[in-house]
Image (tube, rainbow, N blue to C red):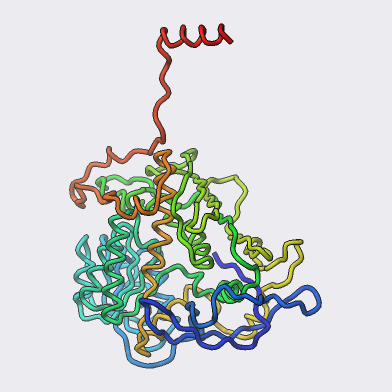
Amino acid sequence: MKENNGISRRTFLKSSAMVGALGAIGTGSASILTSCSGKGESVGSDKPLKAPGSYYVPDLPDKATDGKALKVGVIGCGGRGSGATFNLLDAANGITIAALGDVFQERVDELAGKLKDQKQVDVPADKRFVGLDAYQKVIDSGVDAIIVATPPLFRPLHFQYAVDKSKHCFLEKPICVDPVGYRTIMAAAKQAQAKNLCVVTGTQRHHQRNYVESLKKIMDGAIGEITGGCVYWNQPMLWFKKREAGWNDCEYMIKDWVNWKWLSGDHIVEQHVHNIDVFLWMSGLKPVKAVGFGSRQRRLTGDQYDNFSIDFTMENGIHLHSMCRQIDGCVNNVSEFIQGTKGTWSTENGDTVIKDNTGKEIWKYDKEAEKTAHKQNDPYVLEHVNWVNCIRSNKPIELASATAASCMAAIMGRESAYTGAETTWDAMAASALDYTPKDLNLGKMDMTGFVVPVPGTPHEEKKEEDKKDDKKKEAKK
């Protein structure tokens, strides 16, 4: 989803650089216009949360700068893999889609056909790979960079192999579904940093103009110190696949992957991670514990929940409420809300606004000004613009570790809902929990063990002697 929001009065903010392990990365983004209510009130603060240059702001030109020709391989040729491929071709000139890989032949052929028909790109038959090991063949085919858009369970393994082979990577979110995958991502991210690779992830709000401008305003102190927030992704049920004759268990589950927790991580991880990520990004905090609940009410396939409600306690003691639901016929809301000591920031109803604590709007992103200033405002394209520019300018970027932290937060919430227990960051980050099936095999796999989680313990009837004791206690009262 795309939300649009308010802007800064400043004409330009100087280039910002990524700090810490990411090293210096040339960035910078021109502000557009600000729509303000009131008469010239300042929406900044005498006390910025972070100084410009101490947090990462991407350059977001309409198109990547021409430069070195790049050969790109695509791993995962379904809906998002196909979408990311066309987004990349729209983002930059000089890009060759040189290899395709997927578990299923029809997926590879479908994307190859679209590329030829719509972009006059012909991927040779000997560069189209099929099977669970197709990712290795794509990475080893002589490409410079990789798009990883397989079902989420596989992304840590694919990222690790790509980094081992020194390939620049675009990773669709979520990039892990369990603690083992999280640690794999974090290790590969460190290796990518050491190799000066460029790694961008599909948390597209980081490349969405209204969110980037919001980050600047919040860091400038527009809402003061952050004291809490609420994030939402409530929508109708997503797609599902009915099983067809001849599909074995593994084939069916992968084709219906968005409904199976081992493949997708459940929708709190697969989808709602976007909103959780916004709060972690804007606040600079991670959760230390989570308590939540959820349930399955309407889903037609798979073993996932339909809804989650999670209370996160952050590092400094403030709370984040996370809510997500995929059920038809219910009220919908995809947005974020952050409370500060001076005011609030929110994205609900298609607008991005800052209000003071009386509810007065003091800043609003000017969507019309954005359209005037830029020809390209699709964040799904702009994330590839940034990726290609970083590769061509030899300015390493590594966004996988930050996205992995957001995924781990969502994993904490999911596991608390599944079990009824409080989860903690330290325990989950060190957990041996691994969603990879022991019998993962396209030809033979048993899906009977994939069941809907039930939290807590069963209620048991009291024994007769316990009931007598209860009566005696009541009589004494």
Q: In the image, residue 390 lies at what x, y percent? A: 39, 84
Residue 1 in the figure: left or right of residue 9: left
Q: In the image, residue 191 lies at what x, y percent? A: 26, 74
Question: Which quarter of the rendered picture does the C terminus lie within?
Answer: top right
Quarter location, residue 180: bottom left
Residue 160 in the figure: left or right of residue 268: left
Which residue appears at 52% of the width and 55% of the height? 317
Q: In the image, residue 219 lies at what x, y percent? A: 57, 74
Between 432 and 96, the one nearer to me in the picture: 432
Between 83 and 183, the one nearer to me in the picture: 183
Please identify the residue farthest to the right as the structure is shown. Answer: 39
Which residue appears at 31% of the width and 66% of the height? 186
Residue 102 in the figure: left or right of residue 443: right
Between 119 and 380, the one nearer to me in the picture: 380
* Residue 374 visible in the displayed image: yes
Please identify the residue farthest to the front as the structure is shown. Answer: 476
Image position of 474 with respect to 182: above or below: above
Give the tally of numbered discs: 0
Quarter location, residue 198: bottom left
Q: In the image, residue 117 lies at what x, y percent? A: 38, 77
Question: Which quarter of the rendered picture does the N terminus lie within?
Answer: bottom right
Image position of 456 with respect to 43: above or below: above
Which residue appears at 39% of the width and 57% of the height? 408
Residue 258 in the figure: left or right of residue 128: right
* Residue 367 visible in the displayed image: no
Quarter location, residue 145: bottom left
